[in-house]
Image: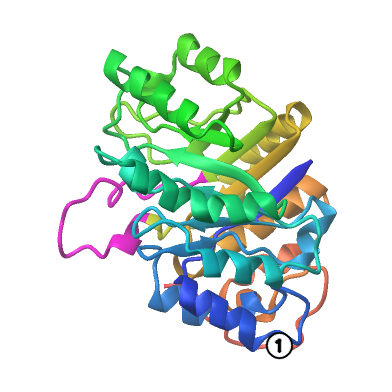
Amino acid sequence: MLHQITSFGGGIRELVAGLRDNSEHPPLQALYSKFRRISHRHHGHHACLHGIRHHQISRVGDAAGHVETHHQQPLRADFCRRWIERVAANPRFLFTAKLWQKFTHESGATAEDEQAVRTGFDILRDAGKLGAVLLQFPYSFHHTPENVAYLKTLVERFADYPLVVEVRHASWNEKDFYALLHERGVGFCNIDQPVIGRSIKPSGRTTAEIGYVRLHGRRYDTWFSDDPATPPEERYNYLYTDAELAPWAARIHKLSGHAGSTFVITNNHYQGKAIVNALQLVSLLSGAKVKVPEPLRHHYPQLESIASEPQKEPTLFPNPPR
């Protein structure tokens, strides 16, 4: 089963407000029309709901969303309950969520911290809406005896959730690491990122019932930049080409044949680029044209070739992406 996910750079409050404002529509259907307002005001450095996808992608798989919270705080219970209400019309809608950065980017997480993250996860799980919990480690997290021991402890600590691990340093590309995940029923996150130094390269690997892919973009000039003059969102300001997406469509197709559920997250969220690339992936995977929201096709005229319907608001001068 393939759960096609795109990612949305928007604050939780803004996104929940957007859902509320469009409550007369089918759940989540109108969010694409808000992509400019949200993605220009928020760029993924708040607690975020990533991965709201449009209803037409159901021809490829079921709807899913990715909850990105590690920059700020654990999932809030009231938000989780609200999201569950908003997707109630689609019983197959699933969320995936990141583990708080206190466990993956810092040290000294306490029992109280664990309880805090479990509160939100448990609400989603008990409602049958938790597809996976992502343990995403930074590039600085290398394959060392100490880090392997910590990873084992962390996986055991949260073993009651469906887990996926994302690492970014190539030192983890070892048989013993993949065996560790497989033995514990933990999924491996295949990523696309700028391959700089010993960055892990693209792959199409499964280690558990969950298949997982995240596409971060290929901004080589800003990925590791510490220049204060460079806005943080520029790391994700990247639009994949058809030629770059094609190998990933092949990997995703193969992954979905070996996994019970496969999640694909496009994390190049700046200015709605993640949604553009997700729709292109859907078209590649399904071999069919897709319904393209009007604001997107005006902003990204390259979507015309995969649009299933003519423009409702034709324009002589499409707005080019910045």
Which image quarter: residue 288?
Answer: bottom right
Part of the protein shown in magenta: 215-235
Q: Is residue 130 visible?
A: yes
Q: Nearer the viewer, residue 22 or 202?
A: 22
Query: Residue 225 magenta-drawn?
Result: yes
Quadrant of the frame with the C terminus: bottom left
Q: Nearer the viewer, residue 303 or 72?
A: 72
Residue found 78% across the figure and 77% down from its top: 26
Query: Residue 175 magenta-drawn?
Result: no
Residue found 43% across the figure and 48% down from its top: 115
Residue 275 image position (x, y, % from top left): 60, 63
Q: Is residue 217 visible?
A: no
Residue found 72% across the figure and 48% down from its top: 3
Residue found 72% across the figure and 71% down from its top: 292
Residue 201 image position (x, y, % from top left): 45, 29
Residue 296 image position (x, y, % from top left): 62, 74
Residue denoted by label 1:
314
Q: Nearer the viewer, residue 236 or 90?
A: 90
Judged left or right of residue 130, residue 142 is left
State whether residue 197 is above or below residue 81. Answer: above
